[in-house]
Image (tube, coloured by chain):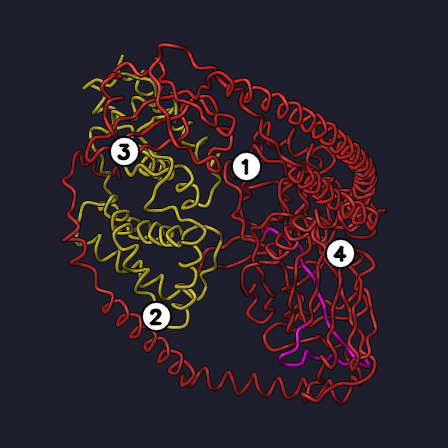
Amino acid sequence: MEPKFNLNRPPINDEEINSNKDFGELVKKFKQQSIRKARQDVSFLKNKKVTYSSIIAGVAVICTVTYFSVFKKNPPKETSNDKITTIQNGSSTSQTKSNKAFIAPPISKLNVPYTSYHVKAEQGANITHKLSKSKIIIPKKAFVNKQGQDIVGDVEIRYREFHNQADIIASGIPMQYDSAGIKTHLESAGMLDIRGYQNNEPVFIKPNKTITVEFASSQPADKYNMYVLDTIGRNWVYTGRDNSLKGLKKQEGEKIAKEPEHNLDSPKMMALQKQIDAIPPKIETEKTVYEKKINQLPKTTQPSIPNKAIAGRPQFQLDVNYKEFPELEAFKNAVFEVGSENKNYDSKIADITWSSANVSEGPQKGKNYLLTLTLRARVEKLIVYPALTGADYDKALKSYEAKFADYKATVAKREATEKKLKEEFEAKQTAYTAELKKYNEDMVKERVRMRQQQEQELADEFSTLSKEQAVTRIFNISNFGICNSDCPSSMPKGESMHPVFITNNGASFITPHNTYLVSHSKNVVYTIYNGSSLSYDPKDTYSICVLASNGKMYLCDKQTFANSVVATKQHKIPVTLLSEEVNDAHDLKMAMGI
Amino acid sequence: MLLNAAYIMEFSPRYHHTAEQLHSEQLIIEAAKLNPEHFGPLYDKYYKQIFGYVYQRMDCKDTAFDLTAQVFLKALTNIEKYEYKGVPFASWLYRIAHSEVMQLFRTKKNLKTVNADISDLRHICEEVEEEYMEQYKSILMTVIKELPEDDLQLIEMRFFEKRPFKEIAEILNITETNAKVRLYRILERVKKTLTKKSK
């Protein structure tokens, strides 16, 4: 039925929308729903059929337990902590029927084996997993037995890791994830299985103790969550965001921030820097000493040459304080001629008896003066030139010549001393500059040497990293079992089909038990159970692994899948029997071209 | 130019969050997991958006309000299972809303409605590089009504609700590229039909 089409429907206003909001009603409904659910659970337990079934089941369990305790002395046991349990126990142990259905390695020889480590429970241990270089940090007194009593002595830690799609398939660990009814698969950044035993009896992690695994992951993205596998609930349990990379990035950031300090770690560079830092103050000190010496040299003032009075120019005779104006000493008995620059000079000024007359420095220092004449409120200012007449001039000239000769000698002496001091200062400055240059050159050489050394160290470190791990993910484990750093990934969308698996060029068909669609663009395996349709994104790369109902495994590699399925959109998928030479998960990875 | 019409914002402030906002929201969610009373801020924040999403797909206002209430009840019931995936909480609510709407339409098919403005149809024409003509209106309406549900949803989200591709991708749990490619293909088909039927 085609939907109705409304064009330009009037919008609803916010007021109307808000009037329908009722959070109180929502919470009330939620609580009623919870109560109803709880009652249903109770009434279910009260149901007679359920009661009888429970009794029968209970009797059956008692009988089974009795049988095992009487006839089976040492049945293989699974490690179990609360809800989180796993059943896979290496290749040598049997599995319970229910768990076998949940975690079922398709072919036992391919299963990822455990590596066994031994720890003194009272001492704890830091174990480096030899296959991946992951670190397992076990605190002291971390284990209890099933009675909750502390364990001392040797504890066996069985540990294994799953890094890629082949590991996932080989282990048989289900990667489907149900989140609020939305079914997805988990894209893995790494998964681990850890458990502990003492004398073949499972041990448990003590409450408030945590085993930390610094997991060497090859998936560097920061998008994963932490999950633990609940084998009873048959689902993964979300435990939180995987923030271990944030911590790692922070550490890397700190490392980078500290790098310049690291550069100065060279003792030679530190010594050089000290010497370099010491030179500018030395130069500054020398400069200060030099300037001080210069300032201390005797100062002298050039004597002024006496002026001869010019007839006809207006003149004043003044009583001068020669201490205040020593250069006028040469003008004892001098007259002051009114300069031609006094345009408004009135000869009547000379006729006035002024109450005061002050001489101050004129516009041309040492040559002219400012004469200020005051009478009550009247003030006249004149620029005047000292001048001498007759014998006074001759005497002044003689005195001037003698003083000028002294002056010249003093100046010459001062210039010679100044030159000498300057040369001394410049010689020292040059020596210090040369010293500084040498230190700087040594510093550059040392820095280059250090940089090369660091680059080499970084290259070595990077090489080690690329060989061993891309990132470290931190798992804090409070219960033994399987945990992973994963993120949900929906089934690919694009093309969908009901596959038919053919072998021998279509001569025979195989009946699949489980089909694993392996994405080559991300670390995820989509499990398709018998009868379900298979969907894929034609732009992505996939291979297929099929566990047939006859227990054999078949592969369709990515090239075949691309050519025979994606390109042709046909439903027949050609598969080949897994080679007998494939003996473990690593061989499977190679065979799948991962 | 296909898929690049300037009128569609590539950033939606009603949906997109800064890292700090995401963190604050995460704290509220964690609190709501412990006590449903703490769900209030999320209810207030997203009620209008979710109602808008639901009402966009139907004609009956009362049904849309009832269904919105149902969406939030379901969200509150399942909040314990919610896990942060680096996208706003809204994307989870939209998915519940989509699931509820689809469930309703499975039983009551006549409730399904496409709601658009004439300007939206113009924009679709612009996207397929066709000049809008009055005759296209009825053709487009027919073409859109006949689209498969998944395709219609993309058209609704992109053109009628004007959502950026990033937001569409997060709500539909697909990649942004995938959303673009899918919409491109739908528009190609729309273009072909328009050309064919208008002749």
Q: Residue at x 24, y 19 (%)?
A: B132
The residue labelled by disc 1 is A537
Q: Distance between the residues labelled 4 and 2?
A: 47 Å
Have a look at marks 4 and 2 and say if they share a chain. Answer: no
Mark 4 residue crowding within 10 angstroms, few (<14) / some (14–19) / many (20+): some
The label nearer to you, 3 versus 2, is 2
Residue A208 lies in magenta, yes or no?
yes
Q: Please, what is the three-letter code of the amino acid marked with disc 1?
A: Asp
Q: Mark 1 lies on which chain?
A: A
The residue labelled by disc 2 is B36
Have a look at marks 1 and 3 and say if they share a chain. Answer: no
The label nearer to you, 1 versus 3, is 1
The residue labelled by disc 3 is B145
Position of residue A452 measured from the top left corner of the image (x, y, whole percent): 82, 39
| Observer able to see residue A165 | no
Q: How far apart are marks 3 and 2 (CA)?
A: 40 Å
The label nearer to you, 2 versus 1, is 2
Q: Specify start and end residues of the magenta stretch as a single range.
A: A187-210
Split into 4 quadrants, where in the image is the N terminus of chain A? top left
Q: Nearer the viewer, residue A466 or A178?
A: A466
Q: In this view, does A174 lie above or below B187?
A: below
Q: Which residue is drawn at 29% across and 35% down?
A: A356
Q: Distance between the residues labelled 1 and 4?
A: 28 Å
Q: Which of A183 and A458 is in front in this view?
A: A458
In yellow, which chain? Answer: B
Q: Is residue A277 above or below residue A123?
A: above
Asked if the residues shown at circle 3 and circle 2 are in contact, with their CB atoms under 8 angstroms apart, the answer is: no
Q: Mark 2 lies on which chain?
A: B
Asked if the residues shown at circle 1 and circle 4 are in contact, with their CB atoms under 8 angstroms apart, the answer is: no
Residue A107 disc label? 4
At mark 2, the secondary structure is helix
